[in-house]
Image (spheres, rainbow, N blue to C red):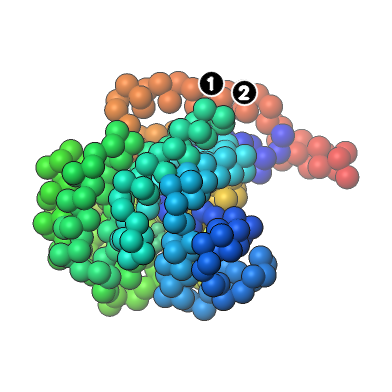
Amino acid sequence: MNQEQYFRRLPKVDLHLHLAGTLQPRTLLDLARKNGVSLPTRDEDRIYRFRDFYDFLDMLERIARCIVSKGDFARVSYEALRDAGAAGNLRYAEMFFNPQYHYAHGIDYETMVDGYIEGIEAAEREFGVVGRLIPSINRELGPDAAVDMVRDLIENPRDRVIGLGMDCAEYKGKPHLFAEAYRMARRAGLRCTAHVCEDNQTLEQAPPSHVIDCIEILGCDRLDHGYNMLADPAVVGRCRDCGIPCTVCSHTCVASRLRTRWDNISRMHEGGLSLVVCTDDPPMFGTDIGQAYVTVCEELRMSPAEAADLSLAGIDATWLSNDEKRGMRRRFKAEIDVLMAALDSSSEGSARQEASRA
Ligand code: HPA
Ligand code: ZN
């Protein structure tokens, strides 16, 4: 096995994955037809092309309109875990969904959450990939709507719903505005994270100070993205010192932004931040969890042992109990030992293997 195959086959967690962003083009076209939703194109190769971040967010909302019945929700979560398990040996995911996208079309919280849970349970039985859910606030709809949403999930508790997130355009809903929604969630025992400082938004739209607000005002114990904090070394220092994990995503909605993204991830790594490599919206960004690890491990010039540490660090950043983390770490280590043993011992070895295969 060469190094790229090893990166791909490492056991992994993904803690930043939006269910509405996991539909393969074929599934999206299917659900759109079934539910009478019109899409900009029916060409599978063109359906996930975006002008910019805001164009991408519009598409996500349109995708959400295509997921209507409990069975549709179940199909989406089932396929997300099945595909990620096959593409990159995903073992565990904490996945976002936006109840507010679906409320707008008359769907109640129980339909969506129970549909997603049904799909997760089926994928767990068939593929052994475990899933949990994180309802996510659409910050563009403001603080009052966020409080209503959080009330809904508190009134309809489910074991698989373990936290609260927040996404969409940061300048339209700055973190401090959502203090009440987050306070309610924490009081109900939910863990908290938020999208912040994403590098496809400007420093004015998504400034480093928002990271401090997420930690101090919202009580986040994890951050999604975080790249723009690099503009303020004091904020980076604060995150490094408290060890808060950042879920960084190897791919984004516009290909011309990839170089910047990879440079930012490298600088965050060099800055000593605790990183978890994730996918965000894999088919929409033309990637999968295996490719995400290959990309980041190669960019950061990681050795096989360093890549194994990256996969194990993902477990520490999950919201599993300490017992569950210990069990998962044991299983990951056993799998990693087998992979290490099958890895060519030198780059010369991998070159030879490639040559003999050609
Ligand atoms: N950022 C903001 N909103 C989103 C994202 C993201 O990465 N993915 C889905 N909605
Ligand atoms: Zn995201």
Residue 266, percent from left and from top: 46, 56
Of the pair 356 and 54, the residue shown nearer to us: 54
Q: How many marks?
A: 2
Quadrant holding the N terminus: top right
Residue pointed to by mark 1: 334
Of the pair 335 and 282, the residue shown nearer to us: 282
Query: Dots 2 and 1: beta carbons under 8 Å?
Result: yes
For the point 45% across and 21% down, the residue is 330
Q: CA distance from mark 2 to mark 1?
A: 7 Å
For the point 19% across and 44% down, the residue is 154
Is residue 257 in view from this perspective?
yes
* Residue 216 placement: quadrant: bottom left
Query: Which mark, residue 30?
Result: none
Tell me which amino acid carries mark 2.
Val
173 with respect to 305 (left or right): left
Quadrant holding the C terminus: top right
347 with respect to 52 (left or right): right
Ligand 2 shows up in the quarter that is: bottom left
Residue pointed to by mark 2: 338
For label 1, count other residues whose C-alpha is less than 10 Å away and answer few (under 14), some (14-19) or many (20+): few
For the point 20% across and 68% down, the residue is 142
Residue 155, percent from left and from top: 18, 44
Tell me which amino acid carries mark 1.
Ala
Look at the picture and state if 319 lies above or below 263.
Answer: above
For the point 29% across and 33% down, the residue is 159
For label 2, count other residues whose C-alpha is less than 10 Å away and answer few (under 14), some (14-19) or many (20+): few
